[in-house]
Image (tube, coloured by chain):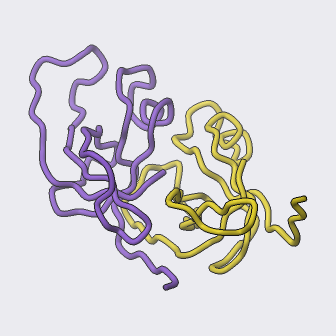
């Protein structure tokens, strides 16, 4: 589970069965100090409430599909929480 | 599993039901010599670990779901499963 920043939205009308009503967002994964790290990716929003500008946390692979209402869908990253606060040591 | 150090906490109000009432920790991975590298995880805590602790982290979905009692559908992957007292690498 990693931190990420939501940087955009994706609209797709025709989707695989089971993905109806699932929102997709473009997220930039963040490193340890919340700096951008790696390439942006598309994640399904399992909270249904995230939007651009939010810091979120994402899960990958099998766990991503398990976060969604239909458990066997073609999804490889999902947003599972919207971060209010991060406290880190220097 | 890997050995890591807790370097922060994450607070999220809006999150997937898997994470309800669970403490989320930021854990950086340590080399056998104890040096942190780039990899980190947001991990669910089940052993009352805190910031600064050296911990044992489980990073596998099925085991994580068994430990937190959320089989078969918990969207969880990383769990802090132990607090390390000593590591002896020769």
Which residue occupies the extreme front position in the image? Answer: B90
Q: Is residue A48 above or below residue A75?
A: below
Q: Residue A47: where, in percent of width, then height?
A: 33, 49
Q: How many marks?
A: 0
Q: Position of B52 compared to B24: left or right? A: right
Q: Quadrant of residue A70?
A: top left
A61 sits to left or right of B60? left
Q: Colour of chain B?
A: yellow
The residue sitting at 52% across, 56% down in the picture is B39
Q: Is residue A17 above or below residue A53?
A: above
Residue placed most toward the observer, A38 or B90: B90
On the rendered image, what quadrant is the C terminus of chain B found in?
A: bottom right
Q: Is residue A48 left or right of residue A51?
A: right
Q: Whole-percent x and y of residue A20?
A: 22, 24
- Residue B34 location in percent, x, y? 71, 68
Residue at horizontal 39 percent and vertical 58 percent from the top:
A3
Q: Residue at x 63, y 79 (%)?
A: B51
Q: In the rendering, what colour is chain A? A: purple
Instruction: Name the residue furthest top.
Output: A17
Residue B87, position as x, y percentages in the image: 86, 65
Q: As drawn, which residue projects farthest toward the bottom? A: A90
Residue under the point 36% across and 66% down: A83
Left or right, residue A76 beside residue B22: left
Is A41 located above or below residue A30 in the figure? Answer: above
């Amino acid at each position: 589970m990693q931190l990420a920043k939501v940087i955009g939205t994706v609209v797709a009308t025709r989707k695989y069965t089971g993905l109806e009503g699932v929102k997709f967002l473009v997220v930039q994964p963040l490193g340890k100090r919340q700096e951008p790290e790696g390439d942006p990716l598309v994640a399904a929003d399992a909270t249904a409430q995230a939007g651009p500008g939010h810091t979120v946390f994402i899960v990958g692979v099998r766990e991503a599909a398990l976060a969604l209402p239909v458990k066997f869908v073609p999804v490889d990253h999902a947003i599972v929480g919207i971060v209010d606060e991060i406290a880190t040591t220097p | 599993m890997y050995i890591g150090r807790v370097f922060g906490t994450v607070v999220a109000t809006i999150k997937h039901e898997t994470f309800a009432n669970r403490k989320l920790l930021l854990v950086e991975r340590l080399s056998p010599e104890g040096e942190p590298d780039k990899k980190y995880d947001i991990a669910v805590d089940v052993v009352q670990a805190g910031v600064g602790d050296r911990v044992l982290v489980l990073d596998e979905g099925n085991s994580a779901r068994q430990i937190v009692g959320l089989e078969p559908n918990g969207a969880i992957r990383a769990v802090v499963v132990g607090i390390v007292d000593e590591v002896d690498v020769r």
